[in-house]
Image (cartoon, grey):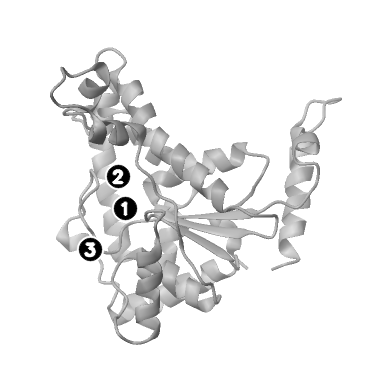
Amino acid sequence: MKMLFPFLTLLCSAISLLSQPAGFADPDSILAGGRPLPRVLLVGTWHFDYPGLDAHVTSEEHKMNIFSEKRQRELAELLDYIARFQPNKIAVEGGRNSGYLIRRYERWQDGTQPLGASEIDQIAIRLMDRFGLDTLYGVDDWSLINEYSSQRDTAQPPSYIDSLWLGFTFDGQDEASLRYKAFYQYKDSMTVEHSLLENFLYINSDKVLERGFGAYLAGHFKSDGQRGPDMLSIFWFNRNLRIFRNLQRITTGPEDRIMVLFGAGHIQILKWLFECSPEYELVEFGSLKP
């Protein structure tokens, strides 16, 4: 595996050079300069404990039981697959004060508390144990409008920013939104019918990630005026920009191999940000196949 990454880097560089117009340099020959870069693996997931806090709520018939014997076998297969990346840092969808995650790991280690159903417990903590890591990095964040709304003076008349937030949802009843609802139900049904690894390979594939972000460009995004674009930028896009900044903060050098475990809805924006940055090497989830 250690020999594979340099080969893939050289191959990608060769493809990139072939795509450049004749006589022009590959931007990375200047911006990256051929130096080793920290590597990042983005792992999009659904929430194994089904908290029901997202816009789409999974029906009971399509919920899996991660504790079943079948799913635990599949989980072992999934963990073996992700382990090929050999992460030395694991970042998760939790607050930056991540001491509670470390305490959970310690209680599991000393036998005083079993792991919960969440993907953080079942994937991140198990991989943390496998690789002998001493911490998990919570890198989630509030968006700008969440922060603003929690601090605003409710005695004052609502501002334009207030009006964006009040009653807004990215859900909708337009044709595109209804098609997305059908797509979400299809993905839920596949969760039941296929193994964990098969599902993770699917939901982390390029087309699924790209179209997943497309849901935010339908529904109330098409509201009158600029409410939709303004709300998307200071809510969802801003939140993911802040998450990316938190990931920059935990990066210490080219030896880093950072696995990022987040709800799949975050992954396309994070993927785009890492692809744009000359300071990281993004490892595609599907490329870990032997």
- Residues at marks 2 and 1 touching, judged by CB atoms closer than 8 Å: yes
Residue at label 1?
A: 187
Residue 204 higher or lower than 24, as above or below: below
Q: Which mark is first along the chain, 3 or 2?
A: 3
Expressed as whole percent of the image width and height from the top left, the position of residue 36 reads: 75, 52
Residue at label 3?
A: 63
Outermost residue on the top side: it is: 225
Residue 177 higher or lower than 53, as above or below: above
Residue 207 can be seen in this image: no
Expressed as whole percent of the image width and height from the top left, the position of residue 231 reads: 31, 26
Residue 174 can be seen in this image: yes
> In what quadrant of the picture does the N terminus appear?
bottom right
Q: Quadrant of residue 26?
A: top right
Label 3 crowding class (10 Å Cα cut-off): few <14, some 14-19, many 20+? some
The kind of residue on which mark 1 rests is Lys
Residue at the image position 59 percent from the left and 69 percent from the top: 84
Residue at label 2?
A: 183
Instruction: Give the SS element for disc 2.
Output: helix
Tell which tag, 2 or 3, sits nearer the viewer.
Answer: 3
36 displayed left or right of 166: right
The kind of residue on which mark 2 rests is Phe
> In what quadrant of the picture does the C terminus appear?
bottom right
Expressed as whole percent of the image width and height from the top left, the position of residue 234 reads: 36, 29
Residue at the image position 72 percent from the left and 67 percent from the top: 2
The kind of residue on which mark 3 rests is Lys
